[in-house]
Image: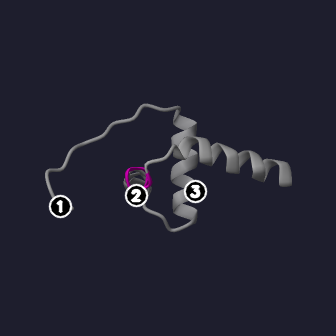
């Protein structure tokens, strides 16, 4: 799906971004590509990933 490239800017708390970058570095992930893959997956699946992610996070928190 090659085509015109666009820039996508997001404002967020600096600590969140630092933690995210650290997580990606520790796991050998490209932080920018992770965002692109997430957006592509949302478009492919056409359901609310935020609700699903939140459900899984709550599930994981209860198991600890």
Which type of secondary structure does the marked residue at label 2 adopt?
A: helix
Q: Which residues fall within the magenta stretch?
A: 41-45
Front residue (pair 15, 62)? 62
Q: Residues within 10 Å of mark 3 (few under 14, many from 20)?
A: few
Q: In the shown orientation, is residue 43 left or right of residue 62?
A: left
Determine if the magenta segment contains residue 18: no
**How far separated are the C-alphas under marks 2 and 3?**
16 Å
Quadrant location, the C terminus: bottom right
Q: Answer above or below: position of 32 versus 18.
A: below
Q: Residue furthest front?
A: 46
**In this rendering, does residue 64 appear at all?**
no
Query: x, y (%) of residue 1?
Result: 21, 62
Q: Earlier in the sequence, mark 1 or mark 3?
A: 1
| Residue at image mark 1 | 2
**In this rendering, does residue 6 appear at all?**
yes
| Residue at image mark 3 | 23
Residue drawn at point x = 57 percent, y = 38 percent: 15
Query: x, y (%) of residue 44?
Result: 39, 56
| Residue at image mark 2 | 37
**How far separated are the C-alphas under marks 2 and 1?**
14 Å
Residue drawn at point x = 54 percent, y = 49 percent: 20
Is there a contact, CB below 8 Å, between mark 1 and mark 3? no
Count of numbered circles in the view: 3
Residue drawn at point x = 69 percent, y = 51 percent: 56
**How far separated are the C-alphas under marks 1 and 3?**
29 Å
The chief SS type of the magenta part is helix
Mark nearest the camera among 1 and 3 is 1
Q: Residue furthest left?
A: 4
């Amino acid at each position: 799906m090659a085509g015109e490239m666009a820039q996508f800017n997001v404002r967020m708390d600096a600590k969140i971004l630092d933690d995210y970058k650290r997580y990606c570095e520790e796991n050998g992930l490209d932080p920018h590509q992770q965002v692109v893959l997430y957006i592509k997956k949302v478009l492919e699946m056409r359901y609310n990933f935020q609700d699903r992610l939140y459900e899984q996070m709550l599930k994981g928190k209860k198991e600890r």
